[in-house]
Image (tube, rainbow, N blue to C red):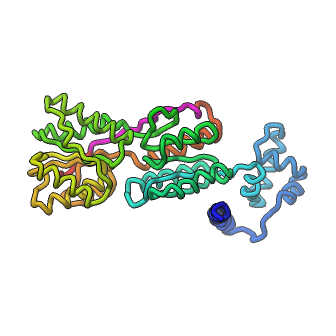
Amino acid sequence: MLVIWQIMCYYQIVIAFNVIDYKKSCRGMDPRMSSIKEVASRAGVSVATVSRVLNNDPVVKPDTKNKVLQVIKDMNYKPNMLAKNLRKQASRTIVMVLPSMSNPYFSEIARGAQAAAYDHTYNIIIGTIESKRWILDTYINMLKTNLAEGIVFVSSSASTELVESLMGDYKVVLCTEYYKGVDAACITIDNRKAAYEAASELIGRGLTSIAYIAGSRETSSVLARIEGYKDALHEAGIPFRPELIAGVQNKFEHVKDAVNRMVEQGLEPDGIITHSDMQAAYVLKGIKERSIHVPQEIGLISFDGTFLAEITNPTITSIVQPLYDLGYGAVRKLVQKLNNEPKAEEEGLIVLPHQLVVRET
């Protein structure tokens, strides 16, 4: 039943795309669609020749090709791409897997991915797993049953073991997080450098007891940011205190509890760096409840640069990541691999620039 449901969902998505394209292409046209036989008849060539022109076959003479293309244009002929893809056993569909869509960080990455898929004439299925393995298995089965040609994993949406198991048989690209020991293409930022800049900004204000509210898992970005944070402390001659690092989920209660524990233990942080804008918003809410003033009594810098950093009061200083470009670049890299473009199979990190934007915190 699960496989049938997947296939039904897939074809509903593909049909939806084709219906939209069909409606767009038919505006102002004769409602009767031209066939490839009619194109061949009007051009005075065989159906096979029209097919070769559509596939850009170099054996077709230039004069013949131009004549056929003109007839195609005059008749508004639209080839049936779905049927063509089925014959080639190519779905022209890719999958992007996200941990969640509740965080605007992921929705902005998804927006870039969707644009890249559109620009390269691919359908894209963007799905979230919400920590449910069976949902992830559904997307993996789309690869294994040829309903999708490649996959992009965003953040920590897959395990190292899963990515390794897919690498040999399928096209895989990682977005924002890489996996140690896995030779896969990954598009991200320089997290170590970014964290160094964030900590240095707070140190430059004279702050010396800086906490880092990290993610709940030891991902590549978390580990790199801790190293960058430590680099800045070391450079300033400030001792590293591991008790000022707390790994928590993106939930208000967890972030609030982490900050409260630090205060109650007498750690008295005068600066906080958070792994995300969402965590920073929760920190603001929590410390306001304790009547702590920002930035007068405590400085705050977040990662991400989503709209959340701009609508809080006060607005949050943040490391702005090129989220749209990360999503776009991940899909573009996957398409290059699918099309066997030169150097497309080269793996490793693709590092995009970030920016420290100083606001009110």
Is residue 303 visible to the viewer in this orientation of the structure?
A: no
The residue at 21%/57% (across/down) is 256
Residue nearer the viewer, 51 or 194: 194
Q: Residue at x 57, y 40 (%)?
A: 165
Instruction: Between residue 339 and residue 36, name the one nearer to us.
Output: 339
**351 inside magenta stretch:** yes
Q: Answer left or right for 137 relative to 254.
A: right
Q: Position of residue 339 (x, y in %)?
A: 65, 40
Residue plotted at (13% across, 54% down)? 294
Relative to residue 360, is residue 322 drawn left or right? right
On the image, the x and y values in percent for residue 49 come to 86, 47
The stretch of residues the image draws in magenta is 344-356
Taking depth in this image into account, of 58 and 327 the one nearest to the observer is: 327
- Image quadrant holding the N terminus, namely bottom right
The answer to whether 46 appears left or right of 274 in the picture is right
Q: Residue at x 68, y 50 (%)?
A: 146
Q: Is residue 123 magenta?
A: no
**Quadrant of the rendered image containing residue 218:** top left
Q: How many marks?
A: 0
User: From where the camera sits, is residue 231 visible?
Assistant: yes
Q: Position of residue 293 (x, y in %)?
A: 10, 56
